[in-house]
Image: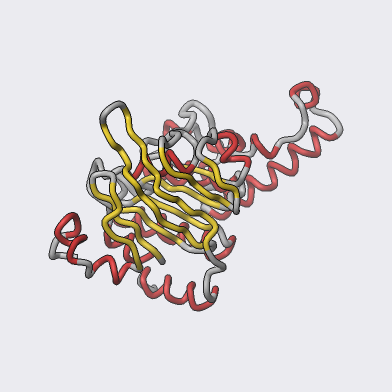
Amino acid sequence: MLALGELRKRHREAEGAAEGSFLRVENVGLHFGGVKAISGVSFEIRRGEISSIIGPNGAGKSSMLNVINGVYHPQEGTVTFLGKQRRRMHPHEAAAQGIARTFQNIALFKGMSVLDNLMTGRNLKMKCNFLQQALYWGPAQREELEHRAKIEEVIDYLEIEHIRKTPVGRLPYGLQKRVELGRALAAEPTLLLLDEPMAGMNVEEKQDMSRFILDVNDQFGTTILLIEHDMGVVMDISDFVVVLDHGQKIAEGTPDEVRSDPVVIRAYLGTAH
């Protein structure tokens, strides 16, 4: 079995060069009262790559994802996605533009089945109105069949057929994380934001999740921006890494460049990395 780093290398060789920047964060500042969560941060994410944001707890990583998908509105700076510059955008508008998100704390409907949770990821794709859906005839019936076909693809892809009817709350943590990834994939995103997708997982579960992330990027061409504390995983699967500390960007570059940066080593990684 190939190591993740070697698998990533082969994926990039097969894909060729990325197509260029399609997400640009420029001088973003975010504060809550007198507390600065993010201060003057800029970076670009290239289409078709896997990028990571790393840094100590409280560095502003999750706040940055919240800015990108419209949960938070920055007081300074702009975010440009697919050529459209904006400062204020709501999460449903971000989702409509092709940005999907998972969360550090799992945000699933615990009493609903895996299948029903995945179907919620198709909400923005549904064109029929509530009455048509309630009557379940004609266009509404055809539309639901199309959505269910997409969900079946996700179920097969993530190898969760055996738990499709199981209430999510009964699943072990690692499988719940996989279901949350599936719900995001159900939206067919252009940009996938992953907030600590491997938190709380054992080694085997991390290996599985890493390979799913690589395959989503490789097979679907989905651009991925993730936050992850496991530096081994970050360095193995990322094309580009942004390092935050106390709300400021202290470094960016390839995994090798970041790993050897003295500023990053002092602030976060330590000599072991």
Residue found 29% across the figure and 60% down from its top: 251
Q: Quadrant of residue 247?
A: top left
- The image's colour scheme reads secondary structure
Q: Position of 207 compared to 19: left or right?
A: left
* Residue 110 to residue 99: above or below: above
Residue lying at 35% horizontally and 61% vertically, measured from the top left: 241
Can residue 202 be seen in this snapshot? no
Quadrant showing the C terminus = bottom left
Q: Quick check: can you spot residue 153? A: yes
Total numbered circles: 0
Q: Residue 1: x and y, percent? A: 39, 73
Q: Percent position (x, y) of residue 174?
A: 38, 45
At horizontal 19% and vertical 55% (from top left) the residue drawn is: 268
Of 18 and 79, the residue lying toward us: 79
Taking depth in this image into account, of 150 and 159 the one nearest to the observer is 150
> Left or right of 254: which side holds 130?
right
Q: Position of residue 74 (x, y in %)?
A: 42, 37
Q: Is residue 144 left or right of residue 44?
A: right
Quadrant location of residue 77?
top left
Up-down relation of residue 196 to residue 33 (above or below): below
Depth check: give the residue in front, 84 or 222: 84
Q: Quadrant of residue 29?
A: top left
